[in-house]
Amino acid sequence: MTTPASAPPTPYATLLGFTRYVDRTGPTKATFVGGLRKQRASRSGFNPHGQFVKALKADIAFHTGGTHLDQVVDVVKPRWRPLYQALVPGATTWLRSLGEPRAVDLAQTRDALAMLGDLPVKVNPQFGVRHADGRVEAVRLHFDEAPPSEEATLATLHLMARHMDAVLPHAEPVLVDVRRGEAHRMPADARPEQIERWLAGEAAAFRAIWATAA
């Protein structure tokens, strides 16, 4: 008696995975989607930034201005220490750009599921920031060595804005380039309908590649 083959994993992407996909061109798109498909099938994956995000959130929540970021470098596993040492200076710069520590508070965000055609994309900002003047921001962090491209930035901010009612009502989406301490917001001249059409096309291609990936 033969054992039936397991069903192939259904197409799915996180916000990080999808924005990295739109950043790629030509054959590298297929290679990237194939890797995501295998990862989904094996249920593998590890986030090395977990302790870093907790430290950054603690500095916002407790108004400590970078104390937790400084300390996390010493407590993280030695394997990840060089990464954290590279991230802390920029993150501290961004944290200080928010102004007086007691003028900002941490806000809870929720994940949302965006549908781009038939492709589910998990929209998952790391946290929110609530300012004393009433402004609210939903923050997604960019950790890569290279700055976020215009395409990745637009895709990230658009999908967050599209589902902000579920993520953090009335908030503005912000993509923070952690290494450089820079915050990116949706350009004033952005055209959401054009971005939506572009992302729908990218999602259709993603699904087609996923279906044929080995």
Image (cartoon, rainbow, N blue to C red):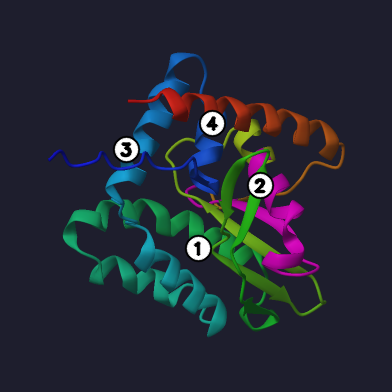
Residue that label 3 marks: 38
Amino acid type shown at disc 3 = Lys
| Front in this rendered view, residue 23 or 131 | 23
Q: Is residue 54 above or below residue 49?
A: below
Q: Which residue is mark 2?
A: 115
- What residue would you read off at disc 4? 207
Hey, what amino acid is under mark 1? Thr
Alpha-carbon span between mark 2 and mark 1:
35 Å
Q: Magenta stretch?
A: 155-179
Going 18% across and 42% down the picture, which residue do you hit? Answer: 3
10 Å crowding of disc 2: few (<14), some (14-19), many (20+): some
Q: Which one is closest to the eye, mark 4 or mark 1?
A: 4
Mark earlier in primary sequence (4, 1): 1
Foreground: disc 1 or disc 3: 3
Q: Marks 2 and 4, Cα distance to the nearest angstrom?
A: 12 Å
Verify whether residue 175 appears in magenta: yes
Res 92 label: 1
Q: Residue at x 54, y 29 (%)?
A: 206
- Decide which of 93, 198 is in the foreground and name it: 198
2 and 4 marks in contact (CB < 8 Å): no
Q: How many marks?
A: 4
Q: Position of residue 88 (x, y in %)?
A: 41, 59
Q: Disc 1 or 3, which lies upstream in sequence?
A: 3
Query: Residue 25 appears at what percent x and percent y?
Result: 52, 18
Tag 2: amino acid = Met
- Whichever of labels 3 and 2 marks the residue nearer the N terminus, that label is 3
Image quarter hosting the N terminus: top left
